[in-house]
Image (cartoon, rainbow, N blue to C red):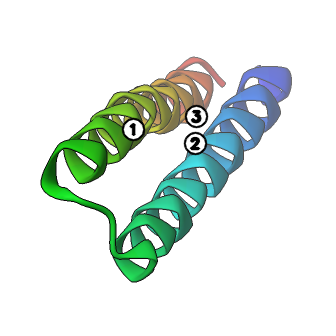
Amino acid sequence: MEILIWIGAVLTILGLAGLMWCILKALAARRAGLADDEMRRALHRVVLLNMGALGLSALGLVTVVAGILLG
């Protein structure tokens, strides 16, 4: 079950990288000084990607725990 731990670790790292990318995109949108409507559209996209990255990270952590419990 060691392979599950490694797969979970990779998924978790990818999810964390996605979260970091979302932070950078939100900061870039904030620094751009966009109008309200443009800012909402930009942040809406970031929020959707943020939820996906958070889900991927959680899935990775669940996979690691399953690998530990089954191993």
Disc 2 packing (10 Å; few <14; some 14–19; many ≥20) = many
Instruction: Tell me if 39 is positioned left or right of 1 in this view.
Output: left
Q: Which residue is mark 2?
A: 15
Tell me the residue that label 1 is attached to: 54
Residue type, label 2: Gly
Task: Give the image location of residue 67, x and y in percent.
Answer: 62, 25
Of residues 40 and 70, which is closer to you in this image?
40
Dot 1: within a 10 Å radius of its alpha carbon, few (fewer than 14), some, or many (20 or more) residues? some
Q: Residues within 10 Å of mark 3 (few under 14, many from 20)?
A: many
Q: Residue at x 14, y 54 (%)?
A: 36
Which kind of residue does numbered mark 3 sit on?
Answer: Val
Q: Which mark, by number, is residue 71?
A: none
Q: Earlier in the sequence, mark 1 or mark 2?
A: 2
Q: Residue 66: image x %, image y %? A: 51, 21
**Image point 85% across, 24% down: which residue?**
3
Secondary structure type for disc 1: helix
State yes or no: discs 1 and 2 in contact (Cβ < 8 Å). Answer: yes
Q: How many marks do you count on the picture?
A: 3
The residue to which callout 3 is attached is: 64
Q: Is residue 21 above or below residue 11?
A: below
Which residue appears at 27% of the width and 35% of the height?
A: 44
Foreground residue among 34 and 25: 34
- Which quarter of the figure is the C terminus placed in? top right
The earlier-in-sequence mark between 2 and 3 is 2
